[in-house]
Image: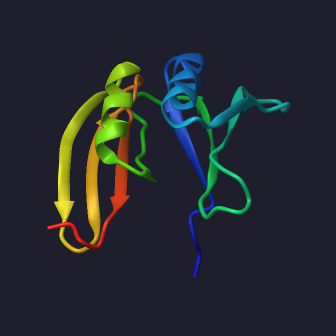
Amino acid sequence: MPRVVHFEIYADEVERATKFYSDVFGWQVHKWDGPEDYWLVITGGDDHPGIDGAIMGRPQPGATGMNFIDVDSVDDYIAKVRANGGTVVRPKMAIPEVGYAAVCNDTEGNPIGLFQGDPSAT
């Protein structure tokens, strides 16, 4: 079955967005050496499950998307999001027997889903 293999984050100010994601999640971000203004995002090593993606200029007003990001602690990452200029849209909530989730906005107004797996969540 097809799987998500890449993501794009749209930004009004690409440099501000790349700094935000680097500072909050420790992602490696570098400009693609191609014909478009496109910043590649490496989210982890090949030995960890997950996907990589890109940050680029917003292709049209209001264009956005959301990806859920697996984190060790939703609480810790909410604090990091706030400390780096983001906002909380939906506070941490339990997903019984699955884990915890929250939705934040980055500095560009894009939603970010934070997910912490925990089968004991109630």
Q: Position of residue 122 (x, y in %)?
A: 14, 67
Residue 94 as seen in the image, left or right of residue 71: left
Residue that appears at 32% across and 24% down = 82
Extreme residue toward the left, this view: 122
Q: Is residue 17 above or below residue 53?
A: above
Q: Is residue 11 above or below residue 47?
A: above
Instruction: Identify the coloring.
Output: rainbow
Q: Is residue 107 above or below residue 55?
A: above
Residue 85 as seen in the image, left or right of residue 121: right
Extreme residue toward the bottom, this view: 1
Q: Position of residue 10 (x, y in %)?
A: 51, 33
Q: Quadrant of the N terminus?
A: bottom right
Give the image quarter of residue 62.
top left
Extreme residue toward the right, this view: 33
- Return the residue nearer the eye: 97 or 85: 97
- Return the residue nearer the eye: 104 or 38: 104
- Return the residue nearer the eye: 76 or 85: 76
Residue that appears at 26% across and 57% down = 100
Q: Position of residue 99 (x, y in %)?
A: 28, 64
Residue that appears at 53% across and 17% down = 16
Give the image quarter of residue 37.
top right
Give the image quarter of residue 84.
top left
- Return the residue nearer the eye: 64 or 17: 17
Q: Position of residue 44 (x, y in %)?
A: 66, 50
- Numbered marks: total: 0
Residue 22 as seen in the image, left or right of residue 12: right
